[in-house]
Image: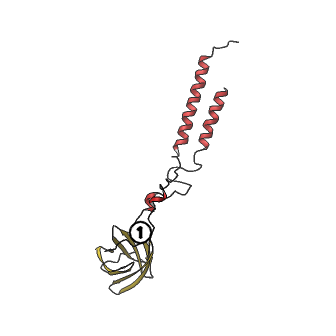
Amino acid sequence: MKHFAIVAGLAASLAVAAPAGAHEGHEHAAPAPTASTTSAAPRFEAQTEDLEVVGVLDAGKLTLYVDRRQTNEPVGGAQVEVEGAGVKALAAETSSATYQLPFPMPAAGKHPLTITVQAGDLLDLVAAELQIAAPLESSAGPVPVAKRSPPPWLPWSVGGVVALLGISLVARRRRSRPEHKD
């Protein structure tokens, strides 16, 4: 019976070690940053009273998404000019309210941009800031792996296995003992 108490205590300890109150799709701890979030393409979001502009720099091209701020309606057929970070160029419309222009990757740091949008009677200057992160130093050693918590089912599974082993141990001991008749 002593072994059963030890095994039952161990199983209960493992069950309590499960993430308290967390269940599938509901993490209580803030997620650790992953490599994919730190290596995402540089982007910015800027707005004025009339416009909202989102820019994404990827593969030597700056893609701009232009919408009316109040209605979130795409602004198509506009003339969009970008100036800053050593670039002054008109963006070509690739689809409705999406514009693109060649944009070499600037050095690490903050780069102010001025975006001029003209569409019909709308003329607006949008100030934005493109921030480029410094590249990771290869001499700094390996990039640490984000600590991940075990899946929520793991402590319960381990506890169940331990409990089953304990029950089988107790059952085996009872079978191997000679029965005492009083």
Q: From the image, which quarter does the C terminus lie in?
A: top right
11 lies above or below 111: above
Crowding at mark 1 (Cα within 10 Å: few <14, some 14-19, many 20+)? some
Q: Residue at 59% across / 40% down in the picture? A: 14
Q: Position of residue 61 (x, y in %)?
A: 33, 71
Q: Where is residue 51 in the image (x, y as percent from the top left)?
A: 41, 79
Residue at screen point 59% across, 41% down = 15
Q: Is residue 91 left or right of residue 54?
A: left
Left or right of 5: which side holds 97?
left
| Left or right, residue 99 beside residue 113 | left
Identify the residue at horizontal 59%, vertical 23% (top origin).
171
Residue 95 is situated, as x and y percent measured from the top left of the image, at: 29, 72
Q: Residue furthest front?
A: 139
What quarter of the picture does the N terminus occupy?
A: top right
- Image coordinates of residue 43 in percent, x first then y, are 42, 70
Camera-side residue of 39 and 76:
39
Q: Would you identify the image quadrant in which residue 5 lies? A: top right
Disc 1 marks which amino acid?
Pro
Quadrant of residue 116 within the rendered picture: bottom left
Q: How is the image coloured?
A: secondary structure
Residue corresponding to mark 1: 42
